[in-house]
Image (tube, rainbow, N blue to C red):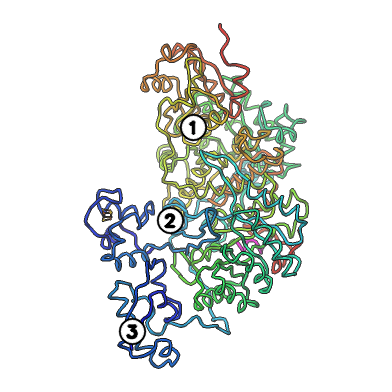
């Protein structure tokens, strides 16, 4: 965005401190616009006619450096781009890399359906939410426009995910677009050869379009030309080479494009970038090796500036690290690392329920909590203040000690005599070495749980309720 | 005759290129009276010569309505015309000028000419930019040191199967990782010295270090048990028997007697690993103490800012390393040291070793023997992009792939060019 201080933003705001936005003053709201934690539309007064001019000016000035474009329609529509910084600690990255997995028009129908369902239904629970994948890329392998249209139709019938229509033949793209013209698919791709016809499709069907050229001069030419024709929803594919010096150059192109867009504010190329890790399959035929290398490529370009990518492997060992790394890079670094220390109820604990200890590191805490609640284990879960450090590291580093654990229950007013029938506390397996200390400090019976909270259900079956001494 | 034009038609009149109107929701059509132009606007437009004048009027009207027309581009705004030729253009982008202070170069290992007995040495650091960036080529590639333990330990199944034949002999284990798995270095972890494990004496532990030094001729890392009371004595004794070998002593940290470890490194010519827990300021503090208070030379310091596994805090580990590297490059001489990662920590992630998901809601996790190595690879790869130089690793397959990608990005891998022009129609 073009503004970098709340004061600059403040000048455009109504300056009446009416607090409708939830902030006490316009200045406070201005700070939220700068860190992008609120939207301009959260200020009702500025939407009134009298402020229209300022609203529109401010809207332009607040727009992210990298153009934000929308692919698809409805609840699964996906925004990509939208970034303002080169490093996540400077603010946060917006609009996580969209993962599209491919299908192709020569697949037998039953395989096509199965594959699309696998893509649509993929999910991995993580810190209170499900990680999922975003799109289906339909590739024309047959070269036959009718066949392609048939595949697009089938796919659009069974999934709500946005589609990417992939063919370098404008006639093929057109036949696909006819089928899903009201679904705002992304079309791939306009090249030096076909750009005339593809630009017409983008204009007529009002859909976003990928520009594909390994030559950055040509890529910029294409972007300028499309822009001049009034097509603004562009994605840049500088080509993803799968190995050797070519891959090194690909990496450099991604850095160059994003640096030009954000650091040098070169509007002409400030568009989302596409990576195609699928090209790993051009050099590796064995499925495990190819899946591994594809995941490696996906990871490189998740970290360094890929906004959307096309992938092939649906192996869990490829998809799991892919979605986790994306979450790693796009998680807002401004959100706290810690949860509030204390003793929390999971489910509806009774006097016979276990009292389980973990740390207040958000990731640890949420992992343990979801393992417990997902397995319907009623219990008390203590989040001990370890300065937001996990169990193993805080035992080693001295942030998780018997005194801290005792203190945590005292501060929370948790009396074992009154709340439990067993006077027992369960420590994490990775804190086993604290057992003696905790017994001495608290006078409680101390049990050692499993080293991973995913194993608590099995541990409970064997060890709970505790056998009388 | 009064002609009216709807606001929503303004776009077509101007050529569909009113950027400033983007995102404006036109609620109900405002009608603009064009009567004073005395012309059918479509006609005027077609005639061309009136365009400028009409646009001028329309802009005035729009301005009165409060639309920011200044950016419309005036009357010269083109219609969505079909271009017949690509607009010629050159792409260029500058280098980062702020990266002025290169990362310190640190040599691990010493050959006979330098008072050691290693066949080769490993040089880390020296970067003048973020890793693999074109601003300044990286002078040294990433290196991998593989873990060896002084007693059998619990390992994920996929890891263990590679070491069953050597698990009782650190020397054989060290030979195996160098000979069979391509390790650049070996880390000997003296975990049995922990008073809660076997309480092996520093003198006995030092014998293991000597065995490993004799078994392999690559540089080595000497790791303690992680017990803050015991480690200084263990590392001191190990440093003594390894005198002159420029081993990496792992680790000095703020919660133990780092001065004693620093002293041993100085006395017996080794390098200190400065280990902190995901905290850039603590890293600065410890580095400063090692240099100022303990007198450790810059070329004898390596940092371990802590590695958390993918899905278990890698976001903190990644950003912490990236911030440290950027601070180092832009002038913070308390942070411009090479970095080391305990990438093996990736195996702590349940996704790496558990048979299947403990949550019924998850999609199938698939076979775990493939999940573990890739968890280690991606954890390491992510940190390599943040600037990490040395990787402490465990699984041979993971080592192989991480080497392949880091050396490709570094520029060592020559391969046949691939044509990707028609990837779209590839049969996979
Ligand atoms: S709603 Fe708007 S005008 Fe009211 S205080 Fe917030 S920013 Fe100011």
B76 left or right of A8?
right
Residue located 38% across and 68% down the image: B26
A28 left or right of B55?
left
Q: Which mark is residue B34?
A: 3
Callout 1: chain: A
Most foreground residue, A10 or A24: A24
Q: Main secondary structure of the magenta part?
A: helix
Q: Quadrant of residue B249?
A: top right
- When the figure is inspected, residue A162 is found, relative to residue B367, above or below; the finding is below
Disc 1 Cβ-to-ligand 1 distance below 8 Å: no
Q: Which mark is residue A365?
A: 1
Specify few, some or many for label 2: CA neighbours under 10 Å numbering under 14, 14-19, or 20 or more.
Answer: some
- When the figure is inspected, residue A377 is found, relative to residue A113, above or below; the finding is above
Residue located 62% across and 27% down the image: B206
Quick check: do tags 1 and 3 share a chain?
no
Disc 2 Cβ-to-ligand 1 distance below 8 Å: no
| Magenta residues, start to end | A244-250
Name the residue furthest left.
A16
Residue B92 appears in the picture as rendered: yes
- When the figure is inspected, residue B105 is found, relative to residue B69, above or below; the finding is above
Residue that badge 2 annotates = B330
Residues at marks 2 and 3 touching, judged by CB atoms closer than 8 Å? no
Quadrant where the C terminus of chain A is found in the figure = top right
Element carrying mark 2: loop
Q: Where is residue A30? Give x, y as percent.
A: 30, 55
Element carrying mark 3: loop
* Disc 2/disc 1 C-alpha distance (Å): 36 Å
Query: Which one is closest to the eye, mark 2 or mark 3?
Result: 3
Specify few, some or many for label 3: CA neighbours under 10 Å numbering under 14, 14-19, or 20 or more.
Answer: some
Residue B301 appears in the picture as rendered: no
User: Residue A248 magenta-drawn?
Assistant: yes
Callout 2: chain: B
């Amino acid at each position: 965005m073009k503004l970098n201080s709340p004061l600059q933003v403040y000048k455009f705001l109504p300056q009446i401190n009416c607090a409708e936005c939830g902030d006490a003053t316009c200045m406070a709201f201005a700070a939220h616009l700068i860190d992008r934690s609120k939207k301009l539309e959260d200020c009702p007064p500025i939407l009134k006619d009298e402020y229209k001019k300022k609203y529109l000016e401010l809207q332009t000035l607040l727009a992210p450096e990298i153009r934000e474009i929308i692919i698809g329609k409805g609840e699964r529509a996906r925004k990509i781009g939208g970034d303002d910084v080169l490093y996540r600690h400077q603010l946060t990255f917006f609009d996580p890399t969209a993962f599209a997995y491919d299908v192709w028009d020569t697949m037998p129908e039953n395989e096509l359906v199965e594959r699309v369902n696998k893509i649509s239904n993929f999910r991995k629970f993580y810190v209170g939410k499900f990680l999922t994948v975003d799109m289906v890329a339909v590739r024309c392998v047959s070269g036959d426009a009718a066949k392609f249209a048939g595949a697009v139709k089938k796919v659009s019938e069974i999934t709500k995910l946005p589609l990417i229509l992939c063919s370098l033949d404008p006639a093929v793209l057109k036949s696909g677009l006819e089928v899903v013209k009201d679904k705002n698919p992304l079309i791939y791709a306009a090249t030096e050869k076909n750009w005339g016809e593809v630009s017409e499709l983008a204009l007529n069907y009002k859909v976003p379009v990928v520009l594909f050229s390994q030559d950055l001069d040509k890529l910029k030419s294409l972007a300028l030309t499309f822009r001049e024709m009034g097509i603004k929803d562009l994605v840049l594919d500088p080509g993803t080479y799968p190995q050797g010096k070519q891959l090194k150059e690909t990496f450099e192109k991604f850095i160059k494009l994003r640096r030009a867009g954000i650091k040098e504010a070169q509007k002409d190329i400030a568009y989302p970038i596409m990576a195609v890790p699928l090209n790993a399959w051009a050099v590796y035929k064995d499925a495990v090796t190819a899946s591994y290398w594809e995941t490696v490529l996906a990871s490189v370009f998740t970290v360094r500036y890929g906004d959307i990518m096309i992938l092939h492997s649906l192996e869990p060992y490829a998809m799991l690290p892919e979605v986790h790394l994306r979450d790693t890079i796009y998680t807002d670094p401004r959100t706290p690392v810690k949860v509030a220390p204390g003793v929390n109820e999971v489910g509806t604990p009774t006097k016979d329920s276990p009292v389980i200890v973990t740390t207040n590191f958000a990731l640890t805490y949420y992992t343990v909590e979801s393992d417990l609640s997902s397995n319907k284990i009623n219990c008390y879960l203590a989040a001990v203040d370890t300065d937001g450090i996990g169990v193993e590291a805080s035992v080693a580093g001295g942030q998780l000690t018997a005194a801290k654990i005792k203190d945590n229950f005292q501060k929370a007013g948790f009396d074992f005599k009154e709340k439990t029938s067993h006077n027992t506390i369960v420590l994490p397996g990775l804190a086993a070495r604290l057992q003696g200390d905790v017994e001495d400090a608290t006078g409680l019976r101390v049990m050692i749980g499993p080293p991973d909270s995913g194993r608590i259900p099995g541990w409970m079956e064997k060890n709970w309720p505790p056998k009388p001494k | 005759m009064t002609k009216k034009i709807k606001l929503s038609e303004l776009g077509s009149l101007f050529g569909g290129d009113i950027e400033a109107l983007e995102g404006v929701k036109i609620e109900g059509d405002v009608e603009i009276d064009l009567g004073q132009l005395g012309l059918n606007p479509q006609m005027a437009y077609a005639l061309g010569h009136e365009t400028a004048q009409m646009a001028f009027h329309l802009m005035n009207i729009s301005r009165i309505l409060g639309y920011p027309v200044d950016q419309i581009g005036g009357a010269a705004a083109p219609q969505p015309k079909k271009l017949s030729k690509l607009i010629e253009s050159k792409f260029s982008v500058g280098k980062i000028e702020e990266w002025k202070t290169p990362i310190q170069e640190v040599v691990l290992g010493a050959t006979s000419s330098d008072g050691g007995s290693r066949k080769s040495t490993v040089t880390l650091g020296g970067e003048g930019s973020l890793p693999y960036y074109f601003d300044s080529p990286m002078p040294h590639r990433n290196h991998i040191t593989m873990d060896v333990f002084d007693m059998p330990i619990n390992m994920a199944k996929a890891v263990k199967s590679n070491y069953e034949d050597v698990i009782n002999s650190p020397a054989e284990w060290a030979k195996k990782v160098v000979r069979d798995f391509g390790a650049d270095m070996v880390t000997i972890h003296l975990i049995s010295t922990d008073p809660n494990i076997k309480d092996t004496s520093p003198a006995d532990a030092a014998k293991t270090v000597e065995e490993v030094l004799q078994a392999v001729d690559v540089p080595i890392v000497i790791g303690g048990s992680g017990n803050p009371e015991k480690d200084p004595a263990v590392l001191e004794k190990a440093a003594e028997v390894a005198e002159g070998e420029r081993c990496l002593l792992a680790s000095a940290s703020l919660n133990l007697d780092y001065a004693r470890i620093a002293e041993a490194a100085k006395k017996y010519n080794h390098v200190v690993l400065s280990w902190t827990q995901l905290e850039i300021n603590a890293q600065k503090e410890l580095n400063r103490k090692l240099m100022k208070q303990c007198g450790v030379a810059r070329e004898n310091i390596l940092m371990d800012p802590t590695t958390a596994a993918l899905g278990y805090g890698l976001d903190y580990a990644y950003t912490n390393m990236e911030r440290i590297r950027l601070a180092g490059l832009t002038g913070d001489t308390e942070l411009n040291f090479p970095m080391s990662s305990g990438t093996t920590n990736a195996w702590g992630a349940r996704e790496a070793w558990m048979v299947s998901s403990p949550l019924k809601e998850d999609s199938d996790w698939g076979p775990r023997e493939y999940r573990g190595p890739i968890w280690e690879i991606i954890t390491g790869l992510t940190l390599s992009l943040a600037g990490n130089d040395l990787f402490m690793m465990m699984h041979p397959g993971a080592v192989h792939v991480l080497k392949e990608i880091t050396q490709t990005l570094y520029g060592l891998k020559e391969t046949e060019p691939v044509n990707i022009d028609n990837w779209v129609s590839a049969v996979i």
